[in-house]
Image: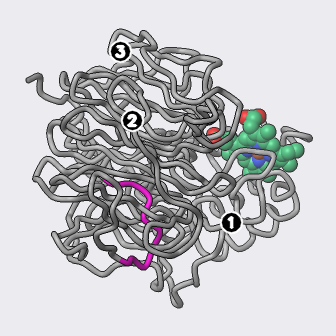
Amino acid sequence: MKSFSFVTLASGFALVVAVAAQDGTKTTWDGVYSAAQAARGQAVYADKCAKCHGTEGGGGDAPELVGSAFGSNYDTFTVNELFERIRMSMPADNPTTLTRDETAVITAHLLEMNGFPAGTTELPTTADGLGKIKYVAIKPAGAPAQAAAEPAPPRLRAAGVLDGPDPKQMETAPALGFTAVNPGLKMPAGIKLGAPSSVAFDKSGNLWVFNRGEHPLMEFDPQGSFVRSFGEGQVTRSHGMRIDADGNIWMTDVTGSTVTKMSPAGNVLLTLGTKGQNGAWDEAAGTRLLFEPCDLAFAPNGDVFVVEGHGRGEGRVLKFDKTGKFLKQWGSNGAGEGQFNQPHSLLVRDGQLYVADRENHRVQIFDLDGNFVKQWKFAGLPCGLLNGPDGQLYLTSGFSGQILRLDANGKAVGAFGQPGPGFADFGEAHYMAFAPNGDIYVADTINQVLHRYAKP
Ligand code: HEC
């Protein structure tokens, strides 16, 4: 197997920080602005920026000025780049009107909003001074955290989306020790990754990302270089994606209400449902429709399970054989055994079917004929299920922003992650995958990034 060059990227990163510290330059983690300066910046920001970028920088009509997407735009550059970006082009409706001092105080405020610690000196206003401060998005080991006198209560960025951990929704378990690193994807000019909804690795170690951009399905080689894309103009809203034992790629279009099976070469082999038509599957009536299919799973004999109902459609599991012949279905909306409230993921494991019954805060376990066996309750919202390469069951806990390793009784025995706007944080931990080297990749629909967490 080819080795991953990503790994060297992570260690190269640590090296950069060390070198920067040696030659007298600083990073954004070294207390490069003062709290008073940031407070002045907040006032100017509220006056000149908030109407487009939101009071908390969370975006609106304009891009977010907090969070991982923002951080990755400036990561490894100097703060002068951010300063000049603001000074030369903002406010968008009245550019080049800010003085250097105004730009500096706003930049200080943005650094504060992005979680960098304040120090005793002010952020300089000169290109020379600003050019000596490196923007480092990921917190290096040992760097001081922002001095928070009182931990701020979690705020909601959007319905259900947390800005910080909500103790009521978190599972307590020993830390798994994964650390956020840059996924190192190399994109060709003009091609952008949209909000990723699902991620998977094929047998050759290529990475597949299903996303909500113009190029819905993207393939990357083990070095992270873009190979090709599929599905342009064909996917209404990307959702689940899994690769079967023969290497075929199965995708669910949650709003288009279809499931598509594609060969590794990119030929569509099968489509279940009719694009744009929501409805129930009724063999007797000859209506073969789906309603908000979310995810799918394969039995060892090739049978395919599809789970549907994402808020509008009825919560249900459908079972097909590998040719797409309908076998059976079960479920309805509700909280009883065998009922669902936005069932979001499913997985075959040891001859049983595990269903993440998201809004019921539980995982239900059935036999492969749909007979209810048992259920496990969770504090957060079970979002994605995966069999790990270590043989253990993994669960993404959506808006609570946790990745959980579960034991055979559904108890979380390991965890990492938290909700928030930062580089390592989740807007929503949607679906995940293990890379061949053991790193974890997580598709985050809300922060709109593909996360990569290096194994300990
Ligand atoms: C009238 C709306 C509007 C106002 C007011 C405005 N911006 Fe923007 N800003 C935008 C838009 C739209 C973009 C993206 C397009 C572009 O780059 O011009 C943007 C982009 C940016 C970016 C680049 C984001 C990135 O991810 O690289 C920064 C930084 C920024 N704005 C900062 C500011 C600051 C600071 C202010 C206040 C001084 C401000 N903006 C005021 C609309 C606005």
| Foreground pick, 410 / 159 | 410
User: Which segment did they paint magenta?
Assistant: 377-385
Q: Nearer the viewer, mark 2 or mark 1?
A: 2
| Foreground pick, 438 / 137 | 438
Residue at disc 3, CB closer than 8 Å to ligand 1: no
The CA span between labels 1 and 3 is: 37 Å
Name the residue at the right extreme: 94
Residue visible at 50% across and 59% down in the picture = 331
- In this rendering, does residue 197 appear at all? yes
At mark 1, the secondary structure is: loop
The CA span between labels 3 and 2 is: 18 Å
Q: Which mark is residue 320?
A: 2
Residue, disc 3? 263
Q: Split into 4 quadrants, where in the image is the N terminus? A: top left
Residue, disc 1? 159
At mark 2, the secondary structure is: strand
Crowd tier of the residue under label 1, counting other residues whose Cα lies within 10 Å: few below 14, some 14–19, many 20 or above: few
Q: Is residue 349 placed above or below 381 in the rendered structure?
A: above
Image position, residue 18 (x, y; %):
24, 50
**First reached walking from the N terminus: tag 2 or tag 1:** 1
Q: Nearer the viewer, mark 3 or mark 2?
A: 2
Q: Is residue 82 placed above or below 40 in the rendered structure?
A: above
Image position, residue 2 (x, y; %):
11, 22
Image position, residue 325 (x, y; %):
41, 28
